[in-house]
Amino acid sequence: MPPRITATPDSGPPTARELFEVLIREHGDALLASIRATAGPAHADDIFQDAVLVAWRRLPDYDRTRPFGPWLRGIARMIALDYAGKHARVRIASPEVMESVERDLRAFERFAGSGAETAMDFRERLAALDDCLSRLPAMYAHAVQAAYRDAHTLAHIASASGESIETIKKRLQRARAMLGECLGAKGAFSEVSPA
Amino acid sequence: MSDARDRLMDALLRQHLGEDSPQMEQRYARAFAALDAAEGSPLRNPTRARALRIARAALVVLCAGTMLLLLPVESNAMGVIAGAVSGESRARGAADERRYEVELRFNRPAPGGGRDRELVLRGNWDMRGDESRLELRASDGPSLVRVDARDGAWEQREGGAARALESSELWPRWIEDRSGRIAVERMDELLRLVQRSYDVAFARAGEESPVALRGSLHLVADRRGRVPGPSQIDLWIDTDRNVVLEAQLRWLPSQPPARGDRPPRGAPPQPQPPRPAPEGDDDYRTAPGALPPHPPRELRLRRIEPIAFPADHFTKPARSS
């Protein structure tokens, strides 16, 4: 949807820079998710910063009748491709995967949640994940919490549980699949079969 | 599950479980400070302050407003860092010539278990675009030059012939970031590391700067977490030009293991885990000799200006092996 910014009568219209900062904050979480999903976590912060800089410089080109989030994420994808040419640690996704990630993110931005109150922003929509996490079998839930909340390495988790790294890797992959199915069932993702 | 959804779920989990609002706020602060630096804009017009406050009021539903109150000092310091990143990146991109006087202090174990001896290496670190040349000398040893140039990497010991080096990854990776191991040979990369992994603040009153650096802004960066890397980094930044005048990196001795981790008294020594292999070509140990693979106690880089290198400064000498 187009950005909804209003100015109060006594303040004068906000400057372009002020509006831009509002828009970036409104779409920053989805931007970061898109960067991490399409280029991996290694240079996500650098790409995020560069995307904001390029978006500001190209703001005159932005068609205000179009949604801002996808435009911003498109810039980030171009920057990520550039990074991938320079840094071996950037795990760049294929064009099909990028397109699928963008499709899911657009659906996620439209996702209103299932609670009594309509979800307003990305973080609030992410709260739907808590319900899905609570439904994970304990073995998978422990692996997810250790890897993502506690930021333990696969080797550490494997060592602590006495299992192989490959087993932990597979378990996390399965857990992500279950969480994805759970979110999909809630209507948070696109229905088109992803790449 | 598809690769796309797996990647997206990985990203969402990182965001939902691994991050909190202050981290996102820091990310915004860095990005907006970089905008300021890139635009070369002065501090915002005070007449716009009221409009800005009102515009930001709309953000209450989007972010934890209280975080803004908790972060002003660090945001300002991060803004200075972002400006320096921009300035140093621009210098690198424009192939500006830079020289840093470098001093490395290592603790070298004395034979027989006596007190550690200090090994001091001094020299110059020269940079032009992506090319770099490090020349180092110990007080009682010959000098050594290692160069990473467009035409290839090479090294030359004093009195010897220059020899080509196979790997372009010449420098020991003394710093381990979440995204991998990095070297210290790029000032912009070092500053980006500070942005990512350090808490940055202005130096406290009483922390006097060297005379040559007075007038610059002194920042103190403390590493978050306990992964390998310098524990503290002091930076003196010329905020008019957004360049780093001096950087001091200190590796503090690692802490002893927690009580519960210690072996019982009298127990036989435990075998040490093997040192992890470096990734890919990033193997300094295949080209030993210039710098120890373990980090120094202290590394100091001081910018020397003005400087102009001869055209062949990074070129391998013709008579070489």
Image: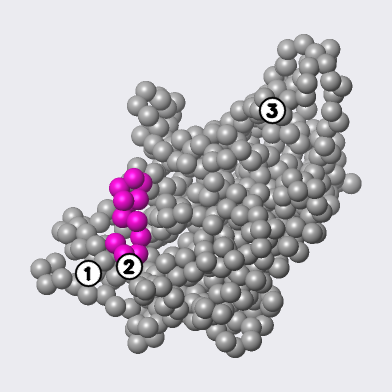
Who's the residue at 72% across and 16% down the image?
A: B117
Circle 1 is placed at which residue position?
A14
Dot 3, crowdedness within 10 Å: few (<14), some or many (≥20)?
few
Label 2 with label 1: CB-CB less than 8 Å: yes
Taking B268 as reference, is B201 left or right?
left
Q: Residue at x 35, y 42 (%)?
A: B73
Badge 1 amino acid: Pro
Percent x, y for residue B83? Answer: 42, 51
Residue depicted at x 44% and y 65%: A123
For the residues labelled 2 and 3, the Cα–Cα distance comes to 49 Å
Q: Chain of mark 1?
A: A
Q: Earlier in the sequence, mark 2 or mark 1?
A: 1
The span shown in magenta is: B60-71
Between residue A70 and residue B173, name the one nearer to us: A70
The answer to whether one can see residue B83 in this image is no
- Across and down, in percent, residue B308 comes to 56, 45
Residue highlighted by disc 2: A22
Same chain for the residues under marks 2 and 3 in the image: no
Callout 2–callout 3 Cβ contact below 8 Å:
no
Q: Amino acid at mark 3?
A: Gly
Q: Is residue B196 something one can see in this rendering? A: yes
Q: Is residue A178 above or below residue B309?
A: below
Residue A105, x across and y down, in percent: 51, 77
Q: How far is disc 2 from disc 1 in space, using C-alphas?
A: 10 Å
The quarter of the rendered structure image containing the N terminus of chain B is bottom right
Q: Residue beneath label 3, please? A: B260
Residues at marks 1 and 3, common chain?
no
